[in-house]
């Protein structure tokens, strides 16, 4: 717990002076004030996060965390758990959706094995793969906790370590993504428990369940919550009882990024569940988060409403991996470039509003 406690204690409020300077500069640029809407607001927020009133984002990274879930034994997914390691190899070969979109926006992808149920064989040292395996998948949470308490702690600490390693390489904005068959079930359990919303409301079809499968998934989540009875005052206990290793890892990334004043662009439903865990540990992290999109997964709206956040866009996406985060990073980068590169009225010799 020491690393988590130290990280949490380092999280500070946004830099109000930098935000005021950024807003003042926005108001002098060659456009009607507020005519770029949310793009202006994002740039001001990034100024507050970084402490630089004209921030520049040079090193973009997507951290995609992978882990398996014992709850798949209950038939809650349309895909077998073997897909998790298969997709990890696809990430490492550069052939997945996240790889394409990351290349498009100029971000690198770092894949982290947080708890895949088999060993990931990487033949040589890889800059885009990190092994932080806590265990070979979580346990079946309908029969007891998904993981031990100390494993939940380790998963968050692993996320902190991964982000700090990327900072050493120059990362100045991070997106978080996930891979794990069964992880929408764990996320729905977390979201229902923390937000207080009905399980039925926050549980979606995941990888494509039919009506019967969705009903099984809802009953399974209710059973897991009843069997485990998480402690509402202890976010780590919630993670341990009904969470996943990759969810804990993403929460750790968010905490560490906030402590180091680095903006975090969250993806969809799974990273949203991780954001709830991080928020329960320290509500200040919300100021450092940017919600990229609204997922098709039904529980994602409940997450964003609980956090008081508005997504940047809605493209009916639900892939995960960090795909929404990659596109979100592109918009954040655009907002900062507007603030940094656009001419002022004085510089351009353009007459201002009378």
Image: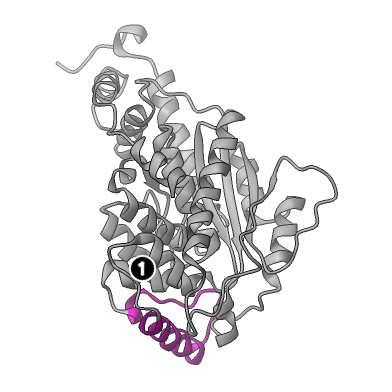
Residue 348 visible, this orientation: yes
Q: Is residue 218 magenta?
A: yes
Q: Is residue 287 above or below residue 171?
A: below
Which corner quadrant of the image does residue 67 belong to? bottom right
The magenta segment is 199-227
**Residue 296: x percent and y percent?**
43, 67
Q: Is residue 290 magenta?
A: no
Q: Secondary structure at mark 1?
A: helix
**Residue 30: x percent and y percent?**
32, 19
User: Closest to the observer: 228 or 320?
Assistant: 228
Residue displayed at 47% across by 49% down: 252
Badge 1 density bin: few <14, some 14–19, many ≥20, Cα 10 Å: many
Quadrant where the C terminus is found in the figure: top left
User: Closest to the observer: 151 or 268?
Assistant: 151
User: Closest to the observer: 288 or 335?
Assistant: 288
Residue 297 visible, this orientation: no
Residue displayed at 45% across by 33% down: 334
**Residue 152: x percent and y percent?**
49, 61
**Residue 326: x percent and y percent?**
53, 46
Q: Main secondary structure of the magenta part?
A: helix
Q: Is residue 56 left or right of residue 301?
A: right
User: Closest to the observer: 4 or 283?
Assistant: 4
Residue displayed at 48% across by 78% down: 205
Q: How is the image coloured?
A: one colour
Q: Is residue 178 left or right of residue 46?
A: right
Name the outermost residue toward the left: 354
Q: Is residue 268 above or below residue 168?
A: below
Name the outermost residue toward the bottom: 212
Q: How many marks?
A: 1
Residue displayed at 46% across by 57% down: 271
Name the outermost residue toward the right: 123
Residue at label 1?
Answer: 191
């Amino acid at each position: 717990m020491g690393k988590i406690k130290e990280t949490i204690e380092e999280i500070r409020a946004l830099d109000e002076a930098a935000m005021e300077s950024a807003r003042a500069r926005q108001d002098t640029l060659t456009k009607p004030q507020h005519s770029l809407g949310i793009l202006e607001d994002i740039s001001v927020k990034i100024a507050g996060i970084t402490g630089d009133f004209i921030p520049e984002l040079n090193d973009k990274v997507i951290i995609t965390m992978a882990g398996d879930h014992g709850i798949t034994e209950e038939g809650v997914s349309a895909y077998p758990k073997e897909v998790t390691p298969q997709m990890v190899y696809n990430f490492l070969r550069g052939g997945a959706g996240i790889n394409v979109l990351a290349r498009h926006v100029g971000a690198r992808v770092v894949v982290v094995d947080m708890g895949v149920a088999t060993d990931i064989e990487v033949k040589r040292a890889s800059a885009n793969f990190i092994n932080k395996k806590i265990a070979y998948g979580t346990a079946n949470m309908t029969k007891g906790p998904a993981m031990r308490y100390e494993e939940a702690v380790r998963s968050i600490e692993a996320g902190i370590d991964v982000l700090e390693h990327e900072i050493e390489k120059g990362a100045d904005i991070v997106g978080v993504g996930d891979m794990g068959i069964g992880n929408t079930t764990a996320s729905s359990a977390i979201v229902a428990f923390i937000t207080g919303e009905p399980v039925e409301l926050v549980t979606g079809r995941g990888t494509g369940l039919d009506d019967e499968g969705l009903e099984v998934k809802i009953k399974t989540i209710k059973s897991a919550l009843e069997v485990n009875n998480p402690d509402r005052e202890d976010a780590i206990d919630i993670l341990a009882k009904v969470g996943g290793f990759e969810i804990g890892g993403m929460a750790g990334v968010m905490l560490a990024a906030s402590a180091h004043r680095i903006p975090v662009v969250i993806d969809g439903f799974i990273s949203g569940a991780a954001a709830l865990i991080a928020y329960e540990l320290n509500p200040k992290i919300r100021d450092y988060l940017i919600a990229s999109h609204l997922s098709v997964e039904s529980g994602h709206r409940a997450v964003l409403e609980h956090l008081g956040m508005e997504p940047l866009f809605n493209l009916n996406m639900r892939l995960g991996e960090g795909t929404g985060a990659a596109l979100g990073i592109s918009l954040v980068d655009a907002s900062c470039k507007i603030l940094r590169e656009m001419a002022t009225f004085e510089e351009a010799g353009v007459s201002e509003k009378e």
